[in-house]
Image (tube, rainbow, N blue to C red):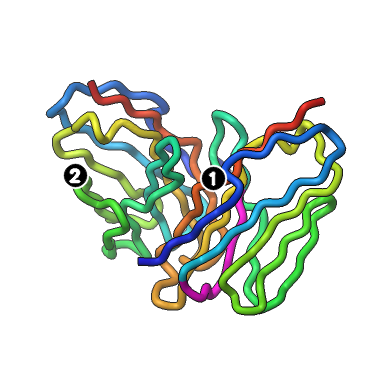
């Protein structure tokens, strides 16, 4: 079992470009979420999903879109990248929202 | 919104000394979770506490959940160099089990 797989591991974007961060899990977890981690800010919730076809906003959703067409995949889309979106992005899953999370290894994104 | 505060921000100890990090929430929590993140790594789930006054131990680590379910602590006895990393607490409030709010973490460094 791979657990939670995030791709790519590193990415450099130019301001205004768009891209999709991928997250795939093979644990049949219903709950999936995206966090961003910035120095001194801890982990902040961007979007989450409690099952296929259901998504909702977290603390910092602006500039990001998500969809959940399958249980396994939860991609995060940056519509028009901005330098403020330079961060490390983590996908996290759990069997249900209130149990311990399994994190992916992260995507380090730099927007120039 | 819900806030989770963690102190201290940094702690440097000599190997063999004890270490404690404290977590306080602005709201009553339905549960609290603790994570460890090694430098350059991703958060790894350590434990979840659910009951008021609960105490759990994992080898040299002791976790406590306050009676009012608004505070928690993690105590490490006789630190080792393998304990180096950032320790995060994270809580769900009763309003939403799907929005886990993280503290900003305590970075522990251990001098051998």
Residue that label 2 marks: A63
Residue B63: percent from left, percent from top = 72, 61
**Does residue A55 appear in the picture of this structure?**
yes
Q: Which residue does the image show at 37% across and 65% down from the upper left?
A: A50
Q: Main secondary structure of the magenta part?
A: strand
Q: Which residue does the numbered mark 1 point to in the structure image? A: A3
The magenta stretch spans which residues?
A: B27-35
Question: Do we see residue B44 in this rendering?
Answer: no
Q: Nearer the viewer, residue B44 or A52?
A: B44
Q: Quadrant of residue B110?
A: top right
Which one is nearer the viewer's eye here, A109 or B89?
Answer: B89
Quarter of the image containing the C terminus of chain A?
A: top left
Looking at the image, residue B84 sits to the left or right of residue B94; the answer is: right
Q: CA distance from mark 2 to mark 1?
A: 27 Å
Based on the picture, tell me whether residue A15 belongs to the magenta stretch: no
Host chain of mark 2: A
Please tell me whether mark 2 or mark 1 is closer to you in this view: 2
User: 10 Å neighbourhood of mark 1: few (<14), some, or many (≥20)?
Assistant: some
The answer to whether residue A107 is above or below residue A42 is above
Q: Secondary structure at mark 2?
A: loop
Vertical order, A11 against A76 (above or below): above
């Amino acid at each position: 079992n791979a657990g939670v797989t995030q791709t790519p591991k590193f990415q450099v974007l130019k301001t205004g470009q768009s891209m999709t961060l991928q997250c795939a899990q093979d644990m049949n977890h219903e709950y999936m979420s995206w966090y961003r981690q910035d120095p001194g800010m801890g982990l902040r919730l961007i979007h989450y999903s409690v099952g296929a076809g259901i998504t909702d906003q977290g603390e910092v959703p602006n500039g990001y879109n998500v969809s959940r067409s399958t249980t396994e995949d939860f991609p995060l889309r940056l519509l028009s990248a901005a330098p403020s979106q330079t961060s490390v992005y983590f996908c996290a899953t759990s069997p249900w929202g209130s149990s311990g999370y399994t994190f992916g290894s992260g995507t380090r994104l730099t927007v120039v | 919104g819900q806030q989770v505060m963690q102190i201290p921000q940094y702690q440097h100890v000599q190997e063999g000394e004890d270490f404690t990090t404290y977590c306080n929430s602005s709201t009553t929590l339905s549960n609290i979770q603790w994570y460890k993140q090694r430098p350059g790594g991703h958060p790894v789930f350590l434990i979840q506490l659910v009951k008021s006054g609960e105490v759990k131990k994992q080898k040299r680590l002791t976790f406590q959940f306050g009676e009012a379910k608004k505070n928690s602590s993690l105590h490490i006895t006789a630190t080792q160099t393998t304990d180096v990393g950032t320790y995060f607490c994270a809580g769900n409030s009763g309003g939403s089990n799907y929005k886990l709010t993280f503290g900003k973490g305590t970075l522990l460094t251990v001098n051998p």
